Amino acid sequence: MSAPAAPLLDTARPRIRFLDSVRRLLPLAWPVLVGQVAVMLFSTVDTLMMGRVGPEDLAALAVGSAAYVTIFVGLMGVVLAVGPLAGRRFGADDLQGAGRDFVQAQWLALLLCVPGCLALWFPQPFIALAQLDPAQAHKVQAYTRPEAIALPAALLFTAFRGFSTAVSRPKAVMLLQLVGLTLKVPLNALLVFGWGPVPALGVAGCGVATAIAMCLQALVAQWLLRHDAFYRPFQVPRLWQTRPDWAALREIVKLGLPMGGSILVEVTGFTFMAFFIARLGATPVAGHQIAVNLVAMMFMIALALATAAGTLVAQHLGAQQLREARTVGRHAITLAALVAAGVGAVVALARAPIVGLYTSDAATMAAALPLLVWVWFFHLGDALQTVAAYVLRAYQVATLPMVIYVVALWGLGIGGGYWLAFGPPAAAALGFWQAATAGLLAAAALLCALLWRVFKDYR
C-alpha cells in the first residue's frame, strides 16, 4: 500500500460548490457508514435473537445494553478527541505529531477503562434505576459482565478508529469492523441458542460473543499498524515501548472531556428512556428496544456524514484554509437535512413490515408501531445536531455544545418525557419519544446557530 498522500486541498482555492463538497464527503463517509452499520448490527443481531428467545430476555438486553452504551459511549467520546487533533496535524503535514497523538489516545483508553469495567462488573445502580425483579436483574448482570471484558478492547479500537479516520484512512477501520461482525454472528447463534455440548446462554451469550469479537478486532488493528505501509510515515511505536505523556494527555482530555460529556448526555437521553420505560413492563420496553435499534441504524448515516465533515474541516483548518472549512461545514449540514428527511419518511411509511422483521409477537408489535411515527422527526433532529457537533469539534468548540445538550436532551427530553409518560394523562413510552424528539430538534437549532457564529469568527 502507498504512503499517505497530502490532504486533498486545492491550492488554487476556488469556491467550493455543493456538489464538489458532496463528492469529497462521500469517499470518507461511505466506509464510515458501512463500518458503523457493522457495529450496529452487533446490537441488531442481539435484538433479533432475543426477540426469538422471549420478551424477558429482550427486556434484559434493553437494560443491559443501555448500561453498556452509557459507559462505553461516554468514555469513547473522550478518546475520540484524537480525531480533531490528529486531523489538524495531518492537514499541516505533521505526520509524526499525529502518530504521537494516537499513542497517547491509546494510553488514555487504557486509563479510562478501569472505572468503566468496574461499573459494568457491578451494574446494580442501573438495575435499581430500572426497578427490575431479581430474575431480570440476574439476566442483566450476566450480560454486562462479559461486556466489562470487551470494554478495554473497544476503547483501544476507538483510538485506532479516530486516528485512522482523521488521516483519511476510514477503509481500514471499516474492514476491521466487518471482520468483527463476521465473528459476532456465528458466535452469537452458538452461545445464545446452544449447540451440542455448548449450553444455551440466552442474553448472556450476547455479551460473551461481543467480548470475543471485540478482543480479536483490537488485536488485528494492532497488527495492521505494524504491517500496513500507510502507517509507517506516522512512526507509531508499540504501546508497551512508550509511557504516558501527561502534557499530551491533558491536551486530549481538555477537548475530550466536553466531547465525551456531550456524547454521554446525548446517549443517556436514549438509554435512560429504556430504564424508565422498563418500569412499565416487559412489553413496552421490548417495543421501545425495536424502535431504538432502528433509529440507531438510521443514525449511522448521519454519523458517517458528520465524521467525514469533521475530518475535512479539521484538515482545512490545519492547512489554514478557513473559507474552505466554512463551506464544507455548511454543505454538510444541508446534505444531512436532505438525507435524513428522505430516510425518515421511508421508515415512517413502511413501519408495519419493518417491525414485522423484528418480532411476530402481536403485543410487542403494537407497542413499537406508534413509536416509529416519531422516528421521522426524531431522526431529522438527530442528524442535524450530529453534523453540527462534529464540525464544531473540528474547530475545537466542545464546552458550549455540552451545555446545550444538557438543557435540550436532559431537561426537555428526559424531564419532559418523564412528565408525559407518568404524569396525568400518562402517555407511557410514546411520551418519552415525543419529548426526546422535541429535545433533539431544539439541540439541532441551537448547535447550528452556534456553528454559524463560529464561522463568522473564523473569517
Image: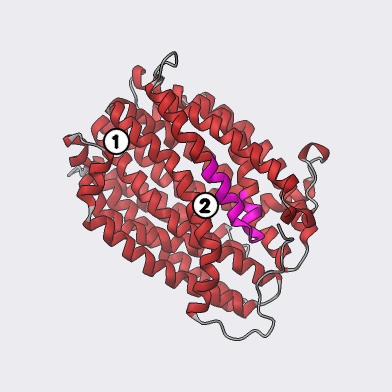
Looking at the image, can residue 31 be seen?
yes
| Quadrant of residue 230 within the rendered picture | bottom right
| Quadrant of residue 179 within the rendered picture | top right
Of discs 2 and 1, which sits in the foreground? 1
> At which x and y percent is residue 63?
39, 32
Q: Is residue 103 left or right of residue 215?
A: right
Residue 76 shown in magenta:
no
Q: Is residue 2 left or right of residue 452?
A: right
Residue type at tag 2: Ser
**Front residue of this view, candidates 327 and 11:** 11
Q: Which residues are magenta?
A: 161-179
- Determine whether the residue tagged by mark 1 lies in a helix, strand or loop: helix
C-alpha span from label 2 to label 1: 25 Å
Q: Main secondary structure of the magenta part?
A: helix
Residue type at tag 1: Val
Tell me what residue is drawn at x 41 percent, y 52 percent: 409
Q: As displayed, is residue 174 above or below residue 207?
A: below
How many labels sit on residues? 2
Tell me what residue is drawn at x 54 percent, y 30 percent: 211
Q: As displayed, is residue 140 above or below residue 266?
A: above
Which residue is disc 2 drawn over?
262
Q: As displayed, is residue 403 above or below residue 159?
A: below
Q: In the drawing, what numbered circle is on residue 173?
A: none
- Determine whether the residue tagged by mark 2 lies in a helix, strand or loop: helix
Which residue is disc 1 drawn over?
285
